[in-house]
Structure formats: C-alpha cells, structure tokens
Amino acid sequence: MAVELRDASVRLGGRSVWSEVDLVVGEGEFVAVLGPNGAGKSTLLGVLLGLLALERGSVSVLGGGAGAHNDRIGYLPQRRVFDASTRVRGVDVVRLGLDGRRWGVPLPGAERFSARARSERARVAEAIERVGASGYARRPIGECSGGEQQRLLIAQALVRRPRMLLLDEPLDGLDLPNQASVAGLVQEICRTQGVTVLLVAHDVNPLLPYLDRVLYLAGGRAAMGTPAEVVTSETLSDLYGSAIEVLRTSDGRVVVVGQPEAPHHHGPRHELRGRGPGQVLG
Amino acid sequence: MNAHFTLDLAADVRELLAYPFMVNALQAAGIAAVMAAVTGWFMVLRRETFAGHTLSMMSFPGAAAAALAGLPLAAGYFAFCAGGALVVAGTGVAGTGSRPASGRGAEAQRAAAIGTVGAGALAIGFVLLSVYGGVLENLESLLFGSIFGVTRGEVLTLAIVAVCTLACLAVLGRPLLFASVDGMLAGASGVPVGAVSTAFLVLLGLAVAATAQITGILLVFALLVAPAAIARELTPRIALGLTLSVVFGLTVAWLGLALSYFTNYSAGFFTTSAAVALFALARAARRLGVVR
C-alpha cells in the first residue's frame, strides 16, 4: 500500500488538528482529501512528507517512514501564483523540479557530451508533453493563465517520475472547465502510470467523475470511503457533531447544507474565504 | 589632460589605454560591472531591489567608520555592506517569485523593516562623521565615486572579491534560482531556503560595496539594477539573461568612463544616462512586441 496511518494524532501550535486517524491508501488509488478550512488537510500532506511529526501513532509512506522516500513523491504545495512580473520560462520552472536541489550551475552546452544532461532534458520535455503544456512552456510563466500555470506546476511535480502525487488544492482559483480538465489530467496520470494521488480540494463536485475514494477530515476526525459512503448526511453529521444535510442534485452534484463556520485561526488566507452554510461543496 | 576625441575610434581607444590611471579605472569599472550585473540579475528576480538599495546605504557608515579608524575606506565598505546584509536577512525570509495569494502583507512588513534598517545606517553614518570631527574630505567622491583615482592595489582587491563572490554564486546556482522562483516548493524539496537567501544577501552586500567604490553610493543602481532590468525586458531565459546583463553592465560602465575622459563630465552621469536610455529602449521594444 502507498500510505498507512495507524492511530495517528497531530498537534500544531498547541491545538489538536486531528487524532486517532486510521487510514490506508492503496497503490494507484486516486483519493480526494476534503473538509473545512483548518481541518488539517494540508497538515496531512505535511505529515506524509515528514515535514510535520505525529504526536502519536504511526505513519508509513511507500513502504518507509514519512520523508524516507520523498524523492519518489511529487508535491504541489498550496496554490502559488506567479504574477505577471515573473520573467522565468515555464520550462525552467519545470526543470527546477528535477535539478533545483543540486548545487552549482549546469555547464553550457552540456548536452553535447553528457548523456545525463540529454536524458534530463528529455524528461522535462516529457513531463511538459504529459500535461499538454508544450504550447506555452517557453513563455514566461507569469504571463500564463492560472490553468496553464497549474499544468506547468503539475509537470514540475511529475518530472521526477514519482510513484505518488500529493496535490494541495490544485483546482483552487481555476474556472470550472479548467477544474474539470486538470482533474481529468490527474486521473489519467493516476490510471496510465499507476501513480497514487492524494488531492486536497474544497469542492468534491469537479472531482466526482474521476476519483476512487474520498477522505473527509472534520471535527478532528476522519472518514474514508467512496463519495456515496462518506459524503452523506449521517457521516458528516457524525464528523461535525451537528446536523448536516447532504443533497444530491439530479445532475449528480453534491450540496452540503448546514456546515458550521470553519474555525478562524492563523493565516490570512482563511479570512479570504468566508464560507456560509448552504454553499456547494463536499 | 589633453583629451582629443576623434572619429578614428581605434585611435581613441589607444589614447584611453595610454594612461595607467585610465587602465586602472577601466579594469575596476569592468570588474564591478560584471559582479553587479550577475548579483543584480538575481536581486531583480528575487524582488530584493529595495534590500540592495538599503545595503548601498551601508557604505556611508562603513566609509565613515573606516576613516575614523584610519583604515582603507574599502575595508569599511565591505565590512558594513556584508554586515548590513546579515541584518537585512534577519528581517525575514526573502521574497520569492511565487507566493500564496495573501503574501503581500508579510512583504510590506519586511520592506518597512528594511527601510528602518537603512534609516538606522544613515544615522550611524552621521554620528560617526561628527565624531570624526568635521567633514569627510572626500564626501563627494563617497557619494558619486572617484573612479579615476583607483590604485593597482584597489583593482587587485576588487578582482579577488569579485572572483570569490562569483564563485559562491555559481555554487549556490540552482538552489538559489529555485528558492528565488518558488521558495515554498524549494523548501519542501529540501533546499535550505533561509541559509541560501542569507548567503545571497551577503554576496549582494559585497557586490554593492564593490560597486559603490566605483560609482559612488548614489549611483550604485546604474550598475546593479539597470543591466539586469534591461536583460529581463529582453529575455525570460536564464543563461541568456545573465549574459545580457553582464554585456549591458560592461557597456554602460566603459562607455561612461570613455565619455567622461573625453568630455571631463562625471563618469557616473554618463553611465547612469546610458543605462536609463537602454532600459527605456528595451522596455519600448517589449511593449511594441519586438521582443517578448
């Protein structure tokens, strides 16, 4: 299996984020990680990368401890914005995913005599091709649209041919057609290359056609299963400890009603997203 | 000096190179220009122009302290600019090209802190000056540079500092680029972003100190910012951008000296004017779509 958490608890700044979480993610599975702001979705990715330590319990990632196999994990941190003044080409940003940690500078013209330099160039081109970004990879990334930037960043996460992708809100800030196409792209990578995917999202709807299972974090606890099992009035009411109603529209979308206001805590980004009851999300 | 500008450019260059003081000046300006162009390219990429500006102000108390202690001014420049870099580094993790949508607040706070450091540097400079008793004799050359008085020893010092700085930048290379473009992911991938950023600021401090000795404190930016800014307008490519930055830096530095020699107006004036003019041209070219 790709990920296994046993009786895991984590604290951040003295606050318990979630506790007694048990979960297993199989190889090649596409799992969406859902839940309100502050529920610990990004924290979970941090734990899997070994950036945050568990308070209690155990974690195993790709058959080793957390952080042991980070070179086989492609990570896409929470949405980053390259503003228009970022005058660096997309292809160079993708390449940093491959060699950005290596000290020194590449020798000019190294491809003429170094097989490694040639194969690295090919890998960058392959990752860009994979996400369909060849058309704009040579433009400054700051001039690319949000969807184009997100594809380039996914290419950056893919460039080391990872066995697992940890994607933190890759759909955030994209319009609906782009959300669907990025979700579809992630599923395709998952299916054709057997890459395990954990994708943090706000809204389950754009992901519903593509994902295998959801992990719902709320109220310091977790529930995992298919959307039909987890995103239900009973499970969510139990997680939140208050009455939640899940409605399913005729076109298959999910609406969650009565979700309590997310707890306000540090980090200005949370203030930007007030979320009242009755909003469409999973 | 009997400077005669003729239409025979080869003869003009021969005349320039006939005087040892002029050769020293051209070498010193060339070394400073290369150093400033490379560090400046990273500085502009990292949006640390304001930090660079603040570091240039460190030259003032540095020179005053060196004068007070009876040391060569260069020692004061290098010590204060590098030390100032550590203070600036202490104001927070350096800026990066990518940020969460709400990173503006932290950036503004850091800019305010850096500005305060700069004000403090000026205050210290004035105190040292008054302790020194009277006017630092070459205050004007401190502010505007004294390129024609450069000695062999100073050229050599400059060359050693430049080689060390550029070698360190080459070692930092890709991780510095990674941390500059995408600090968040660089950190998550194991790049020591804080250490790399601090190291870069110290190198920037050294480049600023070297340049300030040539152009004077007030005109540091002609060699530090302008060549990098021009290169950025012309290309988003990394190696090409660095190369162009060096080419433009050398061009404006040497052009400024030559024009100054033949006209007796200040080299800083010509260097800065040429840099500004090139920047305006490059920006116009990009706006008009001649380059992308």
Image (tube, rainbow, N blue to C red):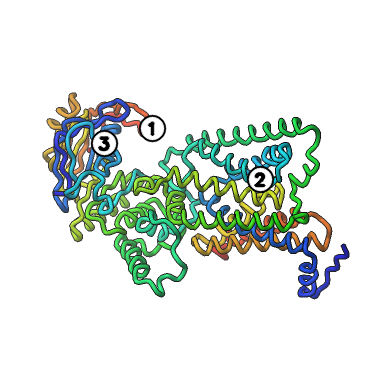
Find residue B209 and report its horizontal and vertical position in percent: 64, 48
Q: Which quadrant of the structure image shows residue B139?
A: top right
Asked if residue A154 is positioned above or below residue B1 in the image, the reply reads: above
Q: Are marks 3 and 1 on the same chain?
A: yes
Asked if residue B62 is positioned above or below residue B243 in the image, the reply reads: above
Report the residue at 46% width, 40% height from top: B93
Label 3 or label 1, whichever comes before in sequence order: 3
Report the residue at 26% width, 59% height from top: A161
Q: Are marks 2 and 1 on the same chain?
A: no
Label 2 Cα neighbours within 10 Å, binned few <14 / some 14-19 / many ≥20? some
Q: Amino acid at mark 1?
A: Gly
Query: Could you tell whether A166 is left or right of B198 in the image?
Result: left
Mark nearest the camera among 3 and 1 is: 3
Q: Name the chain under label 1.
A: A
Find residue A30 and report its horizontal and vertical position in percent: 19, 49
Label at residue B75? 2
Find residue B222 and report its horizontal and vertical position in percent: 67, 53
Q: Amino acid at mark 3?
A: Ala
3D distance between C-alphas at marks 3 and 1: 20 Å
Q: Kindly identify which residue carries mark 3.
A: A53
Q: Kindly identify which residue carries mark 1.
A: A267
